[in-house]
Image: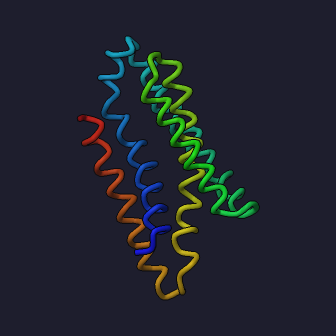
């Protein structure tokens, strides 16, 4: 498997893993950050809303400026925001970091699929999309387990 494909799959895996991992960790985050249930739902909504809105925007920007540039921008934003989440000592820093993670992930997802299939012939693309789907499913399956850990 080509290196670029492994990198695209890794970006896809991590962005999906992240969205499902934090949901399981919410009770622990509530205790650690001394927040109530209403505030904890903001951590979920604060990720999913920018993620859902950003996917169509970054998909279009990928068409305009190039999928590789937007994918790499998304990976960079996602990585920096993930680091910020890991050191967040307050609810609001975690909230802003999660929103930035969502922006990065929303740039990764639509462009990752195009990057994965574009260098291949038509008859090979279905296999690559199958692998992409498997990696995506693995991220959503492994996320809750890691979140619990």
Report the residue that reaches farthest toward the front: 3
Image point (35%, 52%), residue name: 139
Res. 20 image quadrant: top left
Horizontal relation, residue 86 to residue 62: left or right = left
63 is higher (above) or lower (below) than 88: below
- In the rendered image, residue 31, in percent from the top left (x then y), is placed at 32, 15
- In the rendered image, residue 93, in percent from the top left (x then y), is placed at 52, 21
Which quadrant of the rendered structure holds the N terminus?
bottom left
Instruction: Tell how many labels.
Output: 0
23 is higher (above) or lower (below) than 114: above
Foreground of the two, 116 or 87 = 87
Res. 25 image quadrant: top left
Report the residue that reaches farthest toward the right: 64
- In the rendered image, residue 82, in percent from the top left (x then y), is placed at 47, 36
Horizontal relation, residue 117 to residue 65: left or right = left
Horizontal relation, residue 137 to residue 92: left or right = left
Which quadrant of the rendered structure holds the C terminus?
top left
Image point (40%, 58%), residue name: 136
- In the rendered image, residue 118, in percent from the top left (x then y), is placed at 58, 76
Foreground of the two, 69 or 17 = 69
Foreground of the two, 65 or 36 = 65
Please, which colouring scheme is shown?
Answer: rainbow
Foreground of the two, 115 or 127 = 115
82 is higher (above) or lower (below) than 27: below
Image point (47%, 28%), residue name: 43
Image point (46%, 84%), residue name: 124
């Amino acid at each position: 498997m080509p290196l670029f494909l492994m990198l695209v799959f890794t970006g896809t895996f991590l962005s999906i893993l992240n969205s499902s991992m934090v949901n399981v960790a919410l009770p622990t985050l509530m205790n650690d950050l001394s927040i109530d249930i209403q505030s904890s739902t903001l951590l979920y909504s604060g990720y999913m809303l920018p993620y859902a809105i950003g996917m169509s925007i970054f998909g279009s920007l990928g068409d305009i400026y190039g999928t590789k540039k937007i994918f790499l921008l998304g990976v960079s934003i996602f990585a920096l925001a993930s680091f910020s989440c890991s050191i967040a000592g307050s609810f609001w820093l975690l909230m802003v970091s999660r929103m930035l993670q969502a922006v990065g992930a929303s740039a990764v997802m639509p462009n990752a699929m195009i990057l994965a299939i574009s260098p291949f012939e038509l008859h090979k693309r279905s296999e690559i999309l199958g692998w992409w789907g498997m990696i995506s499913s693995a991220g959503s399956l492994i996320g809750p387990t890691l979140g619990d850990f």
